[in-house]
Amino acid sequence: MRRWLRPLWIILALIFLAEAWLWDHLAPVVARLVVLVRWERLKVRVRKAIKHLPPWASLIVFVFPLILILVPLKFIELWAIMSGSWLIAIFFLAVAKIVGVGVTAFLFDVTRDKLLQMGWFCRIYEWVLWARERAHVLVEPFKAQMRRYFWVAPRLLRLLKKMMARLRRRAQGA
């Protein structure tokens, strides 16, 4: 049974790592965009407002804007897919991913201290960090194998091309 579940776990780990990679790589891009828009004042105001809120209220501050922004984008994606407009669906998927990462990073940065005061949230946060590390450990042998393949495969192709060229020259010369 474990043999059959291993590919599923690797696929789930790859999806999890892809999301983590997007988070790691889109967060700085979104941060640059935020700097361009000059949201520092808003960030300072939100931080001051949250400073006086209890942890459960900061959870509402964290989740509510995500729902207000991402749910409509997801409905647009769904509508585009159902109407066969794949490019529009892909566009809104990308927009939702960038906006989602941006809003989540902004709100989590502002609310992190209050959210981590809640035991259950702290446990979930620690579990996500653990799962991310576990996914890296699970996928590392697969990544190493792919690196070896992509290191060897181009060299084998070049070698095969050289051999084919030699064979052609011999066949033409004979």
Image (tube, grey):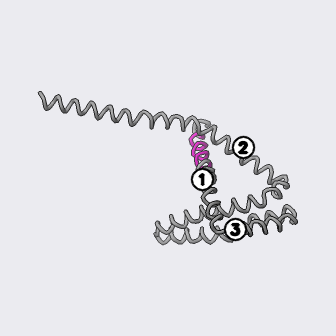
**In the rendered structure, which amino acid carries the disc numbered 2?**
Trp
Residue 50: percent from the left, percent from the top?
83, 65
Kind of element beneath mark 3: loop
Element type at mark 1: helix
What amino acid is found at the position of numbered circle 1 in the picture?
A: His
Q: CA distance from mark 3 to mark 2?
A: 32 Å
N-term-proximal mark, 3 vs 1 = 1
Asked whether 90 or 99 is in front, the reply is 99
Q: Are marks 3 and 2 in contact (CB under 8 Å)?
A: no
Label 2, residues with CA under 10 Å away: few <14, some 14-19, many ≥20 = few
Q: Main secondary structure of the magenta part?
A: helix
Looking at the picture, which amino acid does disc 3 mark?
Trp
In the picture, residue 107 is in which quadrant? bottom right
**Residues under labels 2 and 1: Cα distance?**
20 Å
Residue at the spot of label 2 = 130
Q: Is residue 2 left or right of residue 88?
A: right
Q: Residue furthest left?
A: 174
Q: Which mark is residue 25?
A: 1
Question: Which contiguous range is marked in magenta?
Answer: 5-16
Which residue does the image show at 63% across and 41% down from the upper left? Answer: 136
Q: Nearer the viewer, mark 2 or mark 1?
A: 1
Mark 1 crowdedness (10 Å alpha carbons): few <14, some 14-19, many ≥20: few
**Position in image of residue 20 (x %, y %):** 63, 50
State which quarter of the image contains the N terminus. Answer: top right
Residue linked to disc 3: 39
Say how many tags the image has: 3
Instruction: Determine whether 152 is above or below 40 in the image.
Output: above
**Which callout, 3 or 2, points at the residue further toward the start of the chain?**
3
CA separation in Å, label 3 and label 1:
20 Å
Which residue shows up at 69% across the image and 68% down it? 39
SS for dot 2: helix
